[in-house]
Image (cartoon, rainbow, N blue to C red):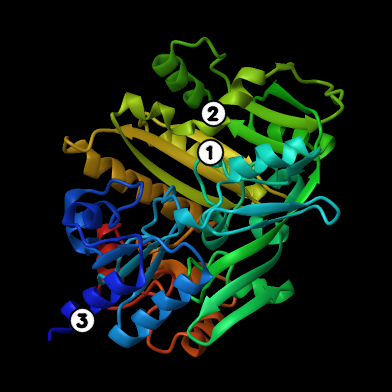
Amino acid sequence: MEIMERFEIDVRRSFSHFSFHPFERRIYSHDISVLPSFVEKMVYSQADVIIQPRNVEEVKEILRLSKEYSKPIVPRGAATSGYGGVIPFNGGIVVDFSRMNGFEIDEDLKLVIAEPGAIWWDIQKAARKRGLSLRIYPTSAISSTVGGWIGQGGIGIGSTMFGDIKENVEWLRVLDFQGEKVVEGEDLRYYVGMEGTTGLIISSAVKLMDAAKEIPLAIEVESVGNALKVFGKTKPYSAILMSSEFFRLMNEVKGSDFKEKDTLVAVYLDEEPKIEGFKYEEASEIWKDRFYPLRIKKKGPSLVSVEILLPFEALEAFYGEARKLEIQHAIQTYFSRGEANVIVLIPSDEREKRFTQDWKKAFKLLKIGLKLGGKPYATGLYLSHLSKKVIQHFDDLLDFKRKVDPQNLLNPGKIFPKGRLPMMLKIAGLII
């Protein structure tokens, strides 16, 4: 009997929710990003099967199948990131955690204990009913999953006050080929932001805070430096710098009448600060729109984007370089405590030749950011060739990966580059 045939029989016997259908396997072999056709051909590898585990025992069974049949495991949340972290590198099992979506709130400890498929905004609504709130959440919170964002890593709403997601995780329960473990403290770095390459997150404890009234203000700024002054003096809960170009595109798409000026949208808890020397007004409408930055995709009808984490002192230079490119674009900058996540959105059209040129401009912006001391928001598959340069303690992480996953079956090709593909993507990105 063929190995693939035995594998399929084993899957059908072990799980209630799975799919070998070619159409579903194709859908699950992509994420939110749309790549130029020549790059797509390099990275595309269709999943062998999609499995939706219902509980921890079924996740353990997936690990058993992976090891027995040498099938890679690709964990998947809502696929709201665009770095190839959830697409197959060489076929294998895509694990859709959407059925493991339970959570409970511990009011005394101010924690939410969540399965990997729990949706951030479902948690926020439940926490609010108990007088609590998430300290931070991603801008894609309406659909993004807990396991997905912890595996991805990064900053979001609330990071200005509370830092990145790793700083807000109390502990993780993780499964790998050696069994189940609870991870906390310094050991979280082996899992948070590692895209499932070192283990599968099966539950997590994330910190909450007391619920507070959110007061969003739109503060006009003449420069990034002005925005940093406000940010430094008033200590907001969350702060987003939106470029004049962003508001111009939003007005075109929505028919709105936002002022087309660089604006710091700063959110304060319970009490409005006095901000001297700046014009500002209430910003409820902009704050409500925080979940829909990709709405300007309608202008495209496609969208090319680049995300880069930059030190504060590099922001002014980066904005200047971005505006020199003379392309239609929008910039949003999310402030954390020690760095800022800069997102550049370029409306484009994948059906036209300019789509490839727009991707090259996005890579140019990434290269500029790296020269200014920044690093990619994530490396995933597409930027894995940069991992050693930008990830702290890379060699230590690699040693850990080899220890817990000697056959390299946990999301291979992500973060830790493998084979010729990273070099090909490096060349496609104009050598970064």
Q: Residue at x 46, y 53 (%)?
A: 98
Give the Cα distance between marks 3 and 1.
39 Å
Question: Are circles 2 and 3 on residues that touch, CB within 8 Å?
Answer: no
User: Which numbered disc, 3 or 1, marks the residue that appears first in the sequence?
Assistant: 3
User: Which numbered disc, 1 or 2, marks the residue that appears first in the sequence?
Assistant: 1
Could you tell me residue 211's position as x and y percent? Answer: 80, 37
Residue, far left: 1
- The amino acid type found where label 2 is placed reads Ser
The residue wearing badge 2 is 243
Residues 368 and 253: in front is 253
Q: Please give left or right for residue 132 compared with residue 83 in the image.
A: right
Foreground: disc 3 or disc 1:
3
Is residue 121 in view from this perspective?
A: yes
Is residue 388 in view from this perspective?
A: no
Q: Secondary structure at mark 2?
A: loop
253 versus 231 height, above or below: above
- The amino acid type found where label 3 is placed reads Arg
Image quadrant occupied by the N terminus: bottom left
Question: Are circles 1 and 2 on residues that touch, CB within 8 Å?
Answer: no
Could you tell me residue 58's position as x and y percent? Answer: 45, 71
